[in-house]
Amino acid sequence: MFNKIKCVIFDLDGVITETSNQHFEAWQAMAQKLGITLEPSFEEQLKGVSRQASLERILAYGQKAISEEDKVRYQAEKNAHYQRLIASFDERQLFPGVDSLLSHLKTKGIKIALGSASKNGPTLIRALGIEQAFDYVVDPNTCASKPAPDIFLDAMKHFNLTPQECLGIEDAQAGVDAIKRAGMVAIGIGDPTPLSQADFVFPTTEDAAQWLMSKL
Ligand code: B16
Ligand code: MG
């Protein structure tokens, strides 16, 4: 299973760093303007879900209908708020284990890709000081959202590989489902219950990194 792997595709939020608090804080503020109160338990439902799909989930939850024009405006407002919240991100926000795993993969000649749903992904990897490690960054604007496999398949096609040669690392159920739909090896990070489709699940990225370095 592991001796074939030629590419590792990393999710960002929840795998490389934690931005879900900032995403949720910005969504809560936006929802409040529409008279919708988002309970903390709702945060899980937005992980790995694109900006547009997140807004749709919030509107459905609050049973609100707004115009397409307002949807665009609210998404822009949420994103501007989110960007203010991550403006101070630097190397200190990088999860333990990421740096050593990236170096290990480089040494082994294994390609490294970013497969995040976030349009802020390139800004974040630059702020975290790991931009140079990535051989390819998937543009989520050109791919269907997770749980569709498109983001992972895009990276695979870029390197001209087969699904069996790719491994994805994800913290969200939608993301793990996307990796499995792509036919790749899926490593889950976090609570194993929602990640039951993953081939292996570890509590933290650091645990996964240590284990993967012994396998790849
Ligand atoms: P943006 P990931 C996802 O990141 C987040 O988990 C999700 O909460 C967010 O809505 C999505 O990115 C889109 O982010 O608004 O910055 O484009 O886990 O796929 O790295
Ligand atoms: Mg994630």
Image (cartoon, helix red, strand yellow):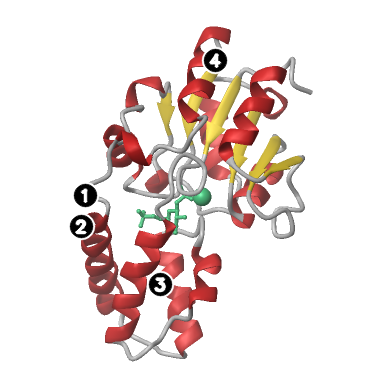
Q: CA distance from mark 3 to mark 2?
A: 19 Å
State the image quarter where residue 22 is shown.
bottom left
Q: Is mark 4 within 8 Å of ligand 2?
A: no
Q: Compare residues 22 and 135 and report the one nearer the observer.
A: 22
Residue 162 appears in the figure: no
Where residue 166 appears, x then y in whole percent?
64, 27
Mark 4 or mark 3: which comes first in sequence?
A: 3
Three-letter amino acid code at disc 1? Ala
Residue at which label 2 appears: 84
Three-letter amino acid code at disc 2? Arg
Q: Residues within 10 Å of mark 3 (few under 14, many from 20)?
A: many
Q: Is mark 2 within 8 Å of ligand 1?
A: no
Q: Residue at x 57, y 27 (%)?
A: 8
Q: Residue at x 49, y 69 (%)?
A: 43
Where residue 141 appears, x then y in whole percent?
38, 48
Q: Which mark is residue 65?
A: none
Three-letter amino acid code at disc 4? His
Mark 3 touching mark 2, by CB under 8 A?
no
Mark 1 touching mark 3, by CB under 8 A?
no
Where residue 69 appears, x then y in whole percent?
25, 76
